[in-house]
Image (cartoon, grey):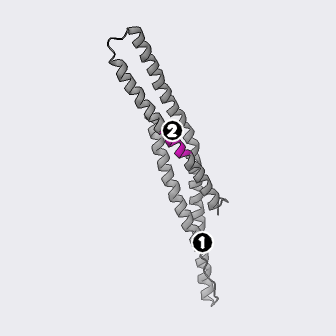
Amino acid sequence: MASGKSIESRRSVLEKVTKNIEDKRSQLGALEKNKEAAREARGVIDNLNDLDDDVKTELERENDNAYNEISQEGEKLSSEMNGDIGQLEQIREETSNAIESANKAKDAERNLIDACRKNNIIFPETKNLDKNISENESLLQEIIKKQQDADKIIAKFGMI
């Protein structure tokens, strides 16, 4: 393998990043609920026509502060996800390189087998490369899916 990392170590990184992303998804849900509550509170405040102007202004200011804190938390969590995105990019590249290396090794093996057959030498084909390619391709699909999930979450954080 060109990257020197095993499938298991890359899968372990993916599992760790997946947990981080799921944690962020949960935090996103909480922020979305808090933002909606702040919007609803603002609507109630805006409709309090009989309230003293100073009190109403103070409530509006507090609501605006809460809304801004929610937005800032969304930005912070989105920024934290950049590390996860970086790790996904790294293991995606390593996995792509591993697939490319295994395919090159498979081609070299085919050439060796063909050369041996021409000289009446029996050389068995290994199945390890096929298994390696298949496992890496499966892992690559998981990584791509997780990257798409992370991108969606980051986009939602940007709308908070």
Query: Can see residue 160?
Result: no
User: What number is the disc on residue 27?
Assistant: 2
Residue under circle 1? Answer: 129
Instruction: Quadrant for the C terminus, please.
Output: top left
Which amino acid, mark 1? Leu
Q: Position of residue 6 (x, y in %)?
A: 65, 61
Magenta highlight range: 20-28
| Residue lying at 38% horizontally and 9% vertically, measured from the top left | 53
Q: Position of residue 58 (x, y in %)?
A: 44, 13
Q: Is residue 50 left or right of residue 57?
A: left
Query: Can see residue 76?
Result: yes
Q: Could you classify mark 1 by the number of other residues whose Cα lies within 10 Å: few (under 14), some (14-19), or many (20 or more)?
A: some
| Residue lying at 39% horizontally and 13% vertically, measured from the top left | 56
Q: Nearer the viewer, mark 2 or mark 1?
A: 2
Q: Position of residue 89 (x, y in %)?
A: 56, 50
In front of the other: 87 or 54: 54
Query: How far is the residue under mark 2 from the one under mark 1?
Result: 41 Å
In front of the other: 15 or 118: 15
In this rendering, is residue 16 above or below 44?
below
Question: Disc 2 on helix, strand or loop?
Answer: helix
Upstream in sequence: badge 2 or badge 1: 2
Residue 26 forms part of the magenta stretch: yes
Q: Is residue 88 left or right of residue 3?
A: left
Question: Disc 1 on helix, strand or loop?
Answer: helix
What's the magenta bit mostly, secondary-structure-wise?
helix
Which amino acid, mark 2? Gln
